[in-house]
Structure formats: C-alpha cells, structure tokens
Image (tube, rainbow, N blue to C red):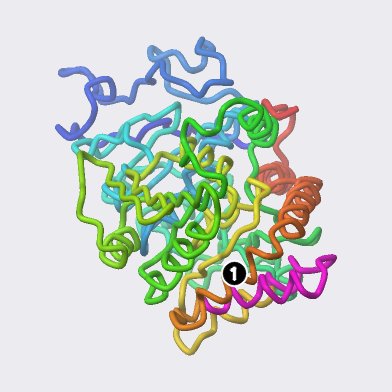
Amino acid sequence: MMRGTWKPVVHWRKWSPKLAPELRPAFGTTPRPTLSPEVSPEVSPELPPELSPELPPKFSTSRITCDIFCRVVDNFGDIGVTWRLARQLANEFGIAVRLIVDDLASFQKLAPEIDLRLAIQQIGGIHVIAWQETSTLEPAQSVIEAFACELPTAYLSAMVEMPQKPVWLNLEYLSAESWVGEHHLLPSPHPQTGLSKHFFFPGFRANTGGVLRERNLLPERDLFLRGNPDLVAPSAPLKIFLFGYANAASGGLLQAFDAVSSKSKNGVGCTIPAGELAQQAAAAMSYQKKHGAVASADLAQFQLNIVPFAPQPEFDRLLWCHDILFVRGEDSFVRAQWAGKPFIWLIYPQAERTHWVKLNAFLDLYCEGLDEVSAAALRELHRAWNDEDNASIGAAFEAFLAQMPHLAVHAKKWSASLSEMPDLATQLVTFITKTAKIQGFAGHHA
C-alpha cells in the first residue's frame, strides 16, 4: 500500500494571487489547499471523511494519484494526447490526476475552459498546473513524463525524498516499428538519483502499450452516425476532412477535389480546421469571402469550409461524419482510426527523412489483408502528400478515390481489430498498480 500525503492541488508555501479563488487558503490561517467540489463525471461528488477540508488532505487508499507532465513542443499533438489520457484516467478509473503543462495558451485551443490568468485550476475534475508552479508540488504515487519532456529538478528531488518511491513512466511516441515491443516497459535507472523509470511504448501489436480509446468511444460513434451527422458536415455526397501542417501540395490536392466535384452530380465538400493549411487553401482556391470565424466558398460543385479549432469531443464528431480523413501528428492519427474511415496520415517531418521509416512501418502493418491495387493507391497518396509532391498528388488522389469501396471496408475492419487490444490507459493503470503493489484498488473501470 502506498502511503504519504499527496496534495490534490499543491503543497503550499505561500499564497499566490494567480490562483483561482476556490483554491486560495483563508487569510490568517495555516496555508492548506482545499478541494474543489468539481469532480470527474464518474466519480462520486461526495468527499469521504479523509478528504474533508477540515482534515489534512489525504486520498483514500482506493484512489491512485498521478501527475502527468507535458511540454507543448510544436502544434497540439503532445497536449492532445496527455489531455485525453488525463481525462480517461480520472473519468474511468477514478484516479486523482494533475496535469502539469508549460503552454496553457495552446492547451486552451483544446479545452476552452482553461483560464490563462490562473496558474492552478481545476477542469473537469483534473487539476491543471502551470509548469512554473512545480517547485512546491509533492509528488504523486505515479508520475508520467510525456514524450521525454524531463521532470523539473525540484520535483525530481522531491521524488527521491519520498519514503515510497513513485512509479515513474516515460510515455513514448506512438510507433508501429517492430523494435517497440522489445523495449516496452523496460526500466532505466536515472544516472543521478538511481530512481527507476520505465518506458511505456504505445503501439499496434499485442506486446506494446496499445493506443488511447475511451470505454464508450465506439458505442458513442455508432450512435452518432445513426443520427444526423450532416448537421456538422458539408451537405455533399463526398465529405473530406483536411487537417494537416502547411503543405506545398495543398493547391494540387484542392484542385483534385474540384475536378472530382465537376465530374459528379452534387460535388465534394471539404472541411478544414483553421490554421496554416487553411490559409494555404484560401490562397490556392482564391476565396476571399469571410464572415465571423467561418469562411466558405463554392468553386464549381466544390464546397470548401474553414471551421474554428474544435475541442476534442467536437473534433471526434467531425471525423466521424466525413468519408475521407486527412490527419496529422499523433492524436488525430489515432482518432481517424477509431472513426473507421479511410485516412491519409501526414506524419511530423524529421531531419534526413527519418519519419519515413515510421510511416512505412505503419503502412506495412495497416495494409495487411488489403488487396494490392488498393494498397498501392493508399501508399502513393501517402507518398505524394508527405513528400509535398504537388505535381502528382492529383493523380494519386483519383487513384485512391477509385479504390474507396475497398478502402472503406478495410478501415472498418482495422478499427474493429484494433479495438480488441487492451487500450493504453487500461494497460498503464495495470502496470502502475502491479508495480506499486497497491492493494485493494478497484477503480471505476468495468
């Protein structure tokens, strides 16, 4: 059983005016964090006696505590993954989670509830803490270092002083490469402290940590699709979702969409989230008409819609109601697979084209069981989009479109097959509980 006091918000040394009112200690009293009544949806709103503000804030032995550290290196992939993970750990397992982030402004794009004025706040039962506030934190029972972001020195020192050392994991980037399974959960001693850190590798094979999938995600998707998905998608027979980094081939791709629209009766509808790629699309298609946060234009039968950046639940629904998904990075890449739709992955580019090893490893795995013609079309459109080959992307898209019946069936089979694996959060919690030898933990996961 893990012991020791884990402060649900912060171990106070002094009052800070940047804190939310409900988190400030009363003036003239011994500084002590109080618990906000806001909790995650699946956790009882009634605090047990040991969590009463009148007593030292201790968690019941049936709740694991977890700190997740995230640095927003570029775009939204890092914070997107950690925010989904934090919510799932809290909502489905009843874990007390603190998410420590270095860039609240980027985080706010995914969670509009974030208040940039507050260094410590609670969102949906999860304590969100700005990176600069970590010097006074008492470590949790489990610590997740996302994507080798490196823990703050003061926090690492506090971990050394803990009588029961925290379970420390480095959450790695998702990869389909074969070596991932061989290194999953291997320990590595810290050179200065001697603390053991385990490397948790997400992946698509049984010997990896799996991918994020909320317990009700697929039933919610299916229920949504039985409703009226056209409410959030273009009213066109072929609906394309285009989300990516700035790409020199965007003009050729949009021209291909327009060409297909001209040949069809009712055309193509394309949705693009606001950002650099949307700006490129606007320039390439020469549309200037804008009103509010949404801009649109019609070229022949081609409907082009630029939409504001959406919070994660809305983003998932956007993916579900489109027919072809262009996605990027890691978070939207995984969500496209749960959508069960044909997709094209724009992987984050790396020096000396090392990202192609990772991309090809995934395509090799994904194309298993797919006929040769469809697999070739899928690979070629991936190549043209990732190589920013404006000259050939039009032909690549037309070849891809010709194989859509086969690709659509394969995407559903892949999603169903992937769902048979234990999800990432379940595997992570299982490892933490076994490693820490926490007795009597039941959690909220059925």
Predominant SS along the magenta part: helix
Residue at position x 47%, y 71% in the image = 348
Please indicate whether residue 297 sits to the left or right of residue 83 in the image.
Answer: left
Give the residue type that dot 1 points to: Glu
Q: Which residue is mark 1?
A: 398
> Relative to 347, does residue 110 appear above or below in the rendering?
above
- Left or right relative to 270: residue 363: right
Q: Position of residue 166 (x, y in %)?
A: 56, 48
Task: Give me the residue at 73% from left, 43% from top.
Answer: 430
Q: Identify the image quadrant of the C terminus.
A: top right
Task: Tell me what residue is drawn at x 33 percent, y 48 percent.
Answer: 134
In percent of width and height, residue 44 lies at 56, 14
Where does residue 3 sit, x and y in percent of width and height? 58, 34
* The residue stretch that appears in magenta: 362-384
- In this rendering, is residue 105 above or below 229? below
Q: Is residue 392 visible to us here? A: yes
For the N terminus, the image quarter is top right
> Based on the displayed image, in which of its 4 quarters is residue 206 positioned?
bottom right
